[in-house]
Image (cartoon, grey):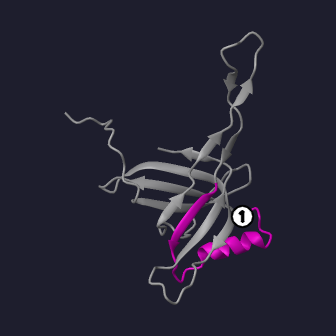
């Protein structure tokens, strides 16, 4: 009998990142954008933190009451091997030159060993805040890695 709710941990090296246009208009219409989909070697910072509100009540001697507070999101860092594509730099340059409203939603998809999508996180209204090219070293033998740092306005687990 097969158990659909198996608790085996997932391998974290099979993932893909996709970008879609994220409209700042109330209509919310989005359309696909071909921008470095799936070309990343590392993704860090998929993180949300809630700061609890501490309420000290008179007569409650066992400790303060804890209530839900504001949620903050970490900067997501995407790393990939340098190639001749310039999409990440062009997006960063576009935003840094005044097109601050040009946001994309980014979806990180985790795959199981069979190649099936098992979990998907979506970052809303992602904004590139840092682009870092690889460090050059004539003695080095490593692959050049570039980074893109993203601030965003929310993260959702889609599946």
Q: Circle 1 sits on which residue?
A: 102
Residue 142: where, in percent of width, then height? 45, 80
How many neighbours does mark 1 have within 10 angstroms: few (below 14), some (14-19), or many (20 or more)? Answer: some
Residue 6 x %, y %: 31, 38
Please identify the quarter of the rendering in which residue 135 is found. bottom right
Q: Is residue 63 above or below residue 74?
A: above
Residue drawn at (77%, 64%) of the image: 100
Q: Is 10 part of what is drawn in magenta?
A: no
Q: Nearer the viewer, residue 142 or 40?
A: 142
Specify whether 94 is left or right of 155: right
Q: Is residue 77 magenta?
A: yes
- The image shows residue 68, relative to residue 100, as above or below, that is above
Q: Is residue 47 left or right of residue 11?
A: right
The magenta segment: 75-101
Q: Position of residue 81 (x, y in %)?
A: 49, 75
Q: Quadrant of the N terminus?
A: top left
Q: In the displayed structure, would residue 3 be above or below residue 59? A: below
Comparing 137 with 44, the one in front is 137
Residue at x 71%, y 75% (from the top left corner): 93
Asked whether residue 31 appears in the rendered view, the answer is: no
Q: x and y percent of residue 158 in the render?
A: 51, 45
């Amino acid at each position: 009998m097969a158990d659909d709710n198996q608790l085996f941990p997932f391998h974290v090296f099979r993932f893909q990142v996709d970008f879609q246009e994220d409209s700042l208009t109330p209509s919310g219409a989005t359309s696909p954008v071909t921008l470095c989909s799936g070309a990343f070697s590392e993704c860090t910072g998929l993180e949300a933190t809630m700061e609890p509100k501490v309420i000290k009540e008179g007569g409650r001697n066992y400790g303060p009451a804890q209530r839900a507070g504001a949620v903050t999101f970490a900067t997501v860092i995407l790393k990939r091997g340098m190639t001749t594509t310039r999409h990440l730099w062009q997006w960063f340059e576009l935003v840094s030159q005044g097109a601050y409203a040009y946001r994309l939603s980014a979806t990180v998809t985790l795959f199981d060993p069979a190649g099936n999508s098992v979990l998907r996180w979506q970052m809303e209204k992602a904004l590139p805040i840092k682009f870092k090219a690889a460090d050059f070293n004539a003695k080095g033998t490593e692959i050049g890695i570039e980074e893109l740092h993203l601030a965003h306005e929310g993260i959702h687990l889609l599946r």
